[in-house]
Image (cartoon, rainbow, N blue to C red):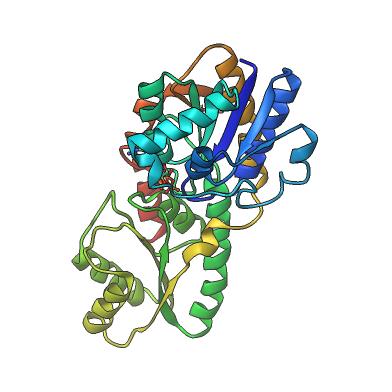
Amino acid sequence: IKKIGVLTSGGDAPGMNAAIRAVARTCAYHQIECVGIYRGYQGLIEGDFEDLSARSVRNIINRGGTFLKSARSQEFKTKEGRAKAHEQLIKNQIDALVLIGGDGTFTGGMLFNEEYNFPIIGIPGTIDNDIDGTMYTLGYDTALNTVVDAIDRIRDTASSHDRLFFIEVMGRDCGHIALNAGLGAGAEEILIPEANRGLEQLLESLERSRNTGKSSSIVVVAEGDKTGKSVFQLAEYVEENLPNYDIRVSVLGHMQRGGAPTCFDRVLASRMGVKAVESLMEGKSNYMVGMIKDEIVITPIVDAIKGKSSVDSDLMRVCEIMST
Ligand code: ATP
């Protein structure tokens, strides 16, 4: 392998810049050329490339987002689009690709690999932590800390006014952010898609809390929760059924995706970047780099995109005990 391309695709996540830096520096270390591809698959199709040296990735390890920019490319979902992408790679003599993104990015990469037998390797970059083959995706730890910080602030006002707050957090169809940040921020209730305990139980539990003298509460709701109600409808439902509660709703939104990556995400990104390049050098393709029990490993992409099947049941039990 003489030249490796790197791109970021799908939703941005803190730690993506650190991963690009790690890929570029590992390439430089092994005397492989590195090319940054702007705007994900769309930039690949359009040939929006820039050579990356070890120096051109300085001062980015601490920055959120992705300096290569990200995009959602409809064109890459078509055969013609992928053909154009392949032509660009041949034209620019790029031998392999490092794809930093989520399951959609990997699905596209796998298809491209099947069609052109082009070497690819994935680095999981998404705050949702919804990918198998790694205990942590890039950006997840930063998002957790951002959410805990936001809930801490909301708690100040909740307790000053004896209010019940419903706080919606990101995570798509997964409850990892809700469960871990909720536990870390001391939420009374956490509603996640993996364990829908029903609305009755929520009412009972809030009533019980109030009877034990709790005058303010935090309920964390995962955006993909399965109660069938939006966070606003949930709040209305509780207001109707539990009178005398002063209820507010807060949707944290995109602030959860931004900010400087935590040290954990920077270290993870650096380790994953090294492993991605060195795996390609060893002739591995169609794998995703991940961390399992503090070891950096690779998993076939086809397994990684199946998603995490469940949340940690021990963690759920701890949450239950903490909300006593
Ligand atoms: P996130 O989890 O943050 O949303 P993601 O990688 O899942 O990240 P997507 O928008 O789903 O984000 O996918 C990124 C890009 O990957 C798409 O814009 C598209 O170009 C490509 N892609 C996704 N699915 C496919 C597919 N089935 N075939 C070809 N390309 C795809």
Ligand 1 position by quadrant = top left
Front residue (pair 147, 18)? 18
All told, the count of numbered labels is: 0
Q: Front-most of 207 and 109? A: 109
Relative image position of residue 265 (x, y in whole percent): 61, 42
- Viewport quadrant of the C terminus: bottom left
Q: Image check: 166 left or right of 23?
A: left
* Quarter where residue 146 is shown: bottom right
Task: Please give the name of the residue rendered at 72% of the width and 46% of the height, measured from the top-left corner.
Answer: 60
Residue 304: where, in percent of width, then height?
39, 30
Farthest top residue? 282
- Residue 17 image position (x, y, % from top left): 65, 43
**Vertical placement of 198 versus 103: above or below?**
below
Query: Would residue 123 be seen by someone viewing this image from the given angle?
Result: yes
Q: Furthest-bottom residue in view?
A: 244
Q: In which quarter of the image is the N terminus?
A: top right
Residue 210 lies, with reference to residue 17, above or below; the image says below
Q: Position of residue 243 (x, y in %)?
A: 27, 86
The answer to whether residue 147 of the structure is visible from this angle is no
Say which residue appears at 49% left-offset and 20% top-offset: 119
In this rendering, position of residue 84 left or right of residue 191:
right
The answer to whether 321 appears left or right of 203 in the picture is: right
Residue located at (52% from left, 59% from top): 256
Image height check: is 267 above or below 233? Answer: above
- Tell me which residue sits at (57%, 55%) in the image: 145
